[in-house]
Image (tube, helix red, strand yellow):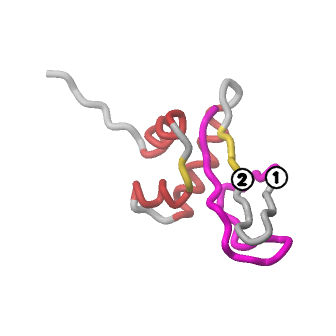
Amino acid sequence: MGESVEKTRRQEIRELLSERTWTLDGLVARYVVAKKIIVDDLEHIARSVAPRHRLEILPPVCEECGFRFKDRARFSDPSRCPRCKNEHLSAQRFRIT
């Protein structure tokens, strides 16, 4: 009989991000945990995949004025646009490249 090896949530997230892009909300819904936990996981994964790979953040865009968040290093979602203060932003997405 073969023993099944349980993967940790971080190992699973790392695999998911290697396959396609995910939003923070998508990962939270998949694992049914607080956003803070997934943010902590993403921060850990970003450190652990380097230097061969990197956890890429595809930045959100303001749906009102088109402002694009550049060089974003935070894993939590921004709450509003710094230019027009609109709170309707596309979700930032993550992937491992």
Under circle 2, the secondary element is loop
Image quadrant in which the C terminus is located: top right
Per the rendering, the mark at residue 31 is none
Residue at figure coordinates x 59%, y 48% from the top left = 42
Measuring from the top left, give residue 94's x and y in whole percent: 61, 46
Q: Quadrant of residue 33?
A: bottom left
Q: Are marks 2 and 1 in contact (CB under 8 Å)?
A: yes
Q: What secondary structure is the magenta-colored segment mainly? A: loop
Mark 2: amino acid: Pro
Q: Could you tell me which residue is drawn at 61 percent across and 36 percent down? A: 96
Q: Quadrant of residue 6?
A: top left
Q: Is residue 65 left or right of residue 90?
A: right
Q: Is residue 25 above or below residue 51?
A: below
Residue range highlighted in magenta:
70-97
Name the residue carrying label 2: 59
Q: Residue at x 68, y 34 (%)?
A: 54
Q: Nearer the viewer, residue 93 or 9?
A: 93
Q: Magenta stretch containing residue 76, yes or no?
A: yes
Q: Residues within 10 Å of mark 2 (few under 14, many from 20)?
A: many
Q: Is residue 78 above or below residue 7?
A: below
> Mark 1 sits on what residue?
70
Residue 28 in the image: state x and y as whole percent.
47, 59
